Amino acid sequence: MSAARPSSRIVCVRSARLSKSRIIAGLQCPRRLWLSVHHPEFEVYAPDARGRFAAGVELGEVARGLYPGGALIGEGVPLSEALRQTTAALARPGDLTLYEATFRHADVLVRADVVQRRDGRVRLVEVKSSTRLKEHHLPDVAIQAWTIEGAGVPLGIVNVAVIDTDFVYRGDGDYGGLLKEIPVADQVRPLLAQVPGWVRGLEEVLAGALPVIATGAQCRRPFECPFLEWCETREGRRPRPAASGPPPLEPPDPALGVVDERAARYLAELPYPRYYLDFETVQFAVPVWAGTRPYQQMVFQWSLHAEREPGVLEHRAFLDTSGGPPSRAAAEALVEAAGTDGPIFVYHDFEKWRLLELAQMETDLAPALEGVMGRLVDLYRLTREHYEHPALHGSYSLKTVLPTVDPELDHALLEEVRDGLSAQAAFHEAVAPGTPAERRDELRAGLLEYCGLDTLALVRLAHRLEGRR
């Protein structure tokens, strides 16, 4: 039997107990649930999903410090023991706080982030790495509440804790104020009556054949399904990988690009030296550097190509993988490298906003950084208004435009780092204490190659818009 085409026969799944995450997967798409149980080897999580999981684990650990005095349930033990520990803890009189309390009802298992009992009243707190309450959080909490109450523990309070973006980390592990709780009991209660139907329906899905469901909007909402690539391949939407790798795709023909002459006239008036700038940033749900906020974009890398005269290029780069706060060093190095004269080409507003934030953080460098901001020239708007190519299909992202200008600079040809998300993943791995030196060097090389390609792409694009080859 081919490993790429799972059997659709009916199988016995009594051992495939439902959990909150499996029910949520089934509500998004029954086929996702079926595959997650019967063929988990087909799961492929994108870098942003892996980063989201890591952020959730880290936040869960920090959250325990914000609800102090509790007991962690089930660490390194079987689920049966976690259930026993939870039951025993709740049987003792008095107030308590439990982390990862484990409950079972109707063969559904859940583990709760925080369960507290105060004066005989039990409260459930589900911790989310989001910055606001989202619609998909409600069925998530409803499944937990239904299971907990079905296990004989009535809930008096049901809250979702989300990250407060106004929080500023003071350092030394002080995360007081990072989370804010939102009462959701009134929104969750109406959903409790639906949970038994969800459970019955999904048990039938698991006991049946592979569901026949076409890919669609549900594959990416609320998150991209880890089986999407498998499903699209099966539907013929993606080429099946060959043993020697994917078949080469025909690159777009740059000769088909059409440039409005107004772009060339505008660029011809700009003086030299000219600079081409790109930032790479990292963000943390739980801030790691004092003075920073949750999800604040922190510049850890930049690339700058300088064109002193037409076609004469120099390259400067900055990359900090020390694990310390990179902003100060990044700002100082950029101010020195960019000089005081000449246009600085960027693509869209990302660099402008990061420069503004750097100026707010490093106030003594603010005048110089504001001077850099005043020299920015947005190639995105110039390209969108004055460049056409049939391969763009209405998209003007740099990754889409670049192959139509210079196919040899296609980011898809890179090996280690190909986009901003994989750049963040590479940074996280590079600064991790356990990363071997050889692997760290590989990641640094990949980051430098990727970011340098971005600014070289800006050079090629500007030349194309100006009528140069």
Image (cartoon, rainbow, N blue to C red):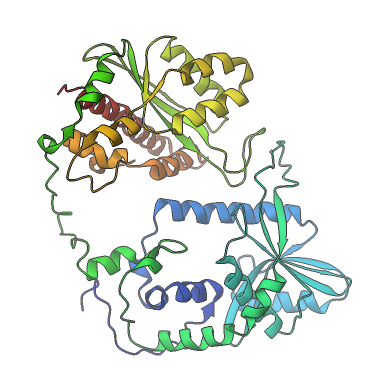
Residue at image position (70%, 48%) is 178
**Position of 106 relative to 78 (above/below):** below
Q: Where residue 368 sits in the image (x, y, percent)?
A: 53, 14
Quarter holding the N terminus is bottom left
Residue at image position (30%, 74%) is 214
Quarter holding the C terminus is top left
**Position of 101 relative to 46 (above/below):** below
Residue at image position (54%, 76%) is 19
Q: Where residue 450 sits in the image (x, y, percent)?
A: 32, 34
| 337, 73: nearer the viewer | 337
Q: Where residue 177 sits in the image (x, y, percent)?
A: 74, 47
Residue at image position (81%, 79%) is 91
Q: Is residue 281 visible?
A: yes
| 313, 319: nearer the viewer | 313
**Position of 314 relative to 439 (above/below):** above
- Horizontally, residue 70 falls left or right of residue 246, namely right
- Horizontally, residue 149 falls left or right of residue 462, namely right
Which quadrant of the figure has residue 128?
bottom right
| 394, 450: nearer the viewer | 394
**Position of 146 relative to 49 (above/below):** below
